[in-house]
Image (cartoon, rainbow, N blue to C red):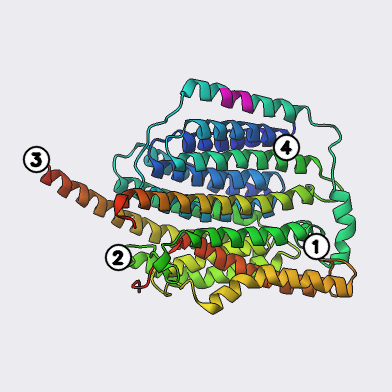
Amino acid sequence: MSDAMLYALAGAMLAGCGTYGLLTAGGALGRILGFNILGGGVFLIFGAVARRGAGAGLAADPVPQALVITGIVVAFCATALAVALLLRLKAADGAGEEEP
Amino acid sequence: MSLLLDAVTLLLVSAGVLFFAAGTLGLLRLPDPLTRIHALTKADNVGLALIVLGLLPQAGSVMAGVKMIAVWALAQIASGAVSQVLAEAATLEAQIEATAREKRP
Amino acid sequence: MSLVFDALAGLLVAGAALAAVTAAAPRAAVIAFMGYGVLLGLAWARLAAPDVALTEIAIGSGISGIVLLRAAAGLPAVPPAANRALAAAISVAVALGLAALVLALPEPAPSRAADAAAALPATGLGNPVTGVLLAFRALDTLLEKIVLLLALVGVWALARDPLWRGRPEPLFAGAAPAPSAFLARVLVPIGVLVGAYLLWAGADAPGGAFQSGATLAAMGLLALMAGLAPLPRADDRRLRLVLLAGPFGLLAAGFLGWATAGAFLAFPPGFEKPVIKIVEIAITASIALTLILVVLGPPAGEERP
């Protein structure tokens, strides 16, 4: 059992937690959190794969690392857009029929 | 000499961990926001200071030591200011709740 | 001993994630999520990926945390809706399935580390992750800049029609508390310095455009929160120029590659590092400003100070 393997298993657990949040959340915010945690688990498994690919004097394979950095930023974009939609929906609900 | 330095590190870091543990216990067990903030700020600042002090003998260069002290100083400033903001917000929230309770006889 | 530490860290991350998805109150869930992000950053640091650790803590936990915390402020606690036992069974099946796949990974592991290390000297960079992001896989980075910009366009598109040229809602309803004004005055100059350092060091050490942009964005938000700077207007031309500088700077460098090196996004031989650095500065400015505007949300009115 290597350290990379331990974190890959942690990533699998995170994906499970995220799935649970996605399935059980009562509100949209909970589903956004669950989706993020699911993604985080997949990233972590990817990171463990990068660590296993250490070689040529590098402690980990840089290609998956760069892809994960890109992934984190894209996940943030999706989260921010989802939150903005959620808040707009809430405002529309609160205003009721007065909206033109 | 290096054995002595290692002993100093071990002692100070262990003491720091003890302060962190106490602060965490306070965070989990104390009843209201103000006492919890009190437990955190006191224990964590001293805890972090002890850990940084303990790690200083292990720093590879003077620059690494300066960076560690800078981390501690930044954490001090941030946690001091943030805990004041938190405390103000907690007091305000408690006041709002109290007035709401008075209105709802 | 270090395996025990790694196992504990993995369990802590999973525990924080579980707390985030099972907390009833939205605010408690978001705070657990932010803690989960910091612990996940620790896991990345243990996986010898300091660049990812910095990005996860700055963007995945910090900036996402502000966005989510603002959203959670007005939301009621909603009881879990679906059949929880069934959901738990499905989730455990997903986790076990992934764990089985992970344990069946091929040996030796496939890797592009040798290729990246061999090609790195040609870019003049010392940090292989920066090399992958800005030289070998620059197309990904270009498209990601555009995704970031599209996210902002999407957020702005949610403004009400008469208000969309104006300023966003302030981060504080009233006047900023004195301690946060103090914090902004002391921390912002230091934080800007740290951001600039992360960008500069990113060529050879952990750091780079994303981490630097996120740090600068946090400092900008701190200054806005303390009322040290006016909220930006969505129709400000200079603001829009900075937003476009990153994606279009990289695009321009890409077309320049056709003229000088014979391929799109190839950097001119002999000038790789200066060109990469100039593009990176533009990208960092765009990232910082886009993150600030995405956190602030859609424009909400003209009358805001």
The crowd level at tag 3 (other Cα within 10 Å; few <14, some 14-19, many 20+) is few
Label 4: state its secondary structure.
Answer: helix
The magenta-colored residue range is C90-94
Q: Is residue C293 left or right of residue C173?
A: right
Q: Which mark is residue C174?
A: 2
Query: What chain does badge 1 belong to?
Result: C
Q: Is residue A52 left or right of residue A31?
A: right
Q: Name the residue under label 1.
A: C135
The picture places residue C152, in percent across and down from the top left corner, at 55, 61
Q: Mark 3 points at which residue?
A: B105
Amino acid type at image mark 3: Pro
Q: Alpha-carbon distance for marks 3 and 4? A: 60 Å
The picture places residue A66, in percent across and down from the top left corner, at 73, 53
Magenta stretch containing residue C153, yes or no? no
Q: Name the residue under label 4.
A: A4
Amino acid type at image mark 4: Ala
Query: What chain does badge 2 belong to?
Result: C
Q: Residue furthest front?
A: A100
The crowd level at tag 2 (other Cα within 10 Å; few <14, some 14-19, many 20+) is few
The picture places residue C197, in percent across and down from the top left corner, at 64, 69
